[in-house]
Amino acid sequence: MLDLEKYIRVVPDFPKKGISYKDISPLLMHPEAVEFCVDEFVKNLPTMQIDKVVGVESRGFFFAMLLAQKLKAGFVPVRKKGKLPYKVLQEAYDLEYGNDWLEIHQDAILPNENVLVHDDVLATGGTARAACNLVKRLEGEIVQCNFLLEIKALNGIEQIKQYPTQVLLSY
């Protein structure tokens, strides 16, 4: 088993004082670590067909796209407000250091499609909950939520406790 923690850089006081940012950039520079993560995510998925993989802006895109390719599923970007060019649904959310809006294209997910939601970090859970709410509003079925890492002290898992969740590394 690969020690993923050695690939995560902790940056103190970013993006503001008192926050210890978990930077996945070093992990992304090591193909063996990326491949290990993708394999772990796929290995621990339910056996059903995944139709779409939702990646949450922006670092969630990295692994979501790789997972979509490996699963032969469509990739759906969930982005911050004003970044998608077509008709969108919006969902407000709170995060560790502020609040914002997420958007998804209205035609990105069809009713009853099986959806995997992926983001890099589960912190307060606000972003994950908003992404899941967007999927549900489009009548998609959330099969699982995946995160590269979780900040356990922030208890974000409570925001999405109704969905199966997979985390590769906890802090």
Image (cartoon, grey):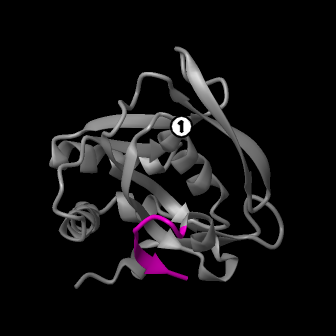
Residue 82: image quadrant is top right
Between 84 and 163, the one nearer to me in the picture:
163
Q: Residues within 10 Å of mark 1 (few under 14, many from 20)?
A: some
Between 167 and 27, the one nearer to me in the picture:
167
Vertical order, 78 against 82 (above or below): below
Rendering coords of residue 86 (x, y %): 52, 14
Rendering coords of residue 127 (x, y %): 62, 53
Q: Residue at x 68, y 76 (%)?
A: 154
Q: Residue at x 74, y 62 (%)?
A: 96
Q: Which residue is mark 1?
A: 137
Rendering coords of residue 124 (x, y %): 67, 66
Task: Say which amino acid is labelled 1.
Answer: Arg
**Left or right of residue 117, residue 3 in this image:** left
**Left or right of residue 128, residue 36 in this image:** left
Residue 129: image quadrant is bottom right
Rendering coords of residue 12 (x, y %): 71, 73
Residue 52: image quadrant is top left
Query: Tag count in the figure?
Result: 1
Magenta residues (range): 161-171
Residue 102: say if magenta. no
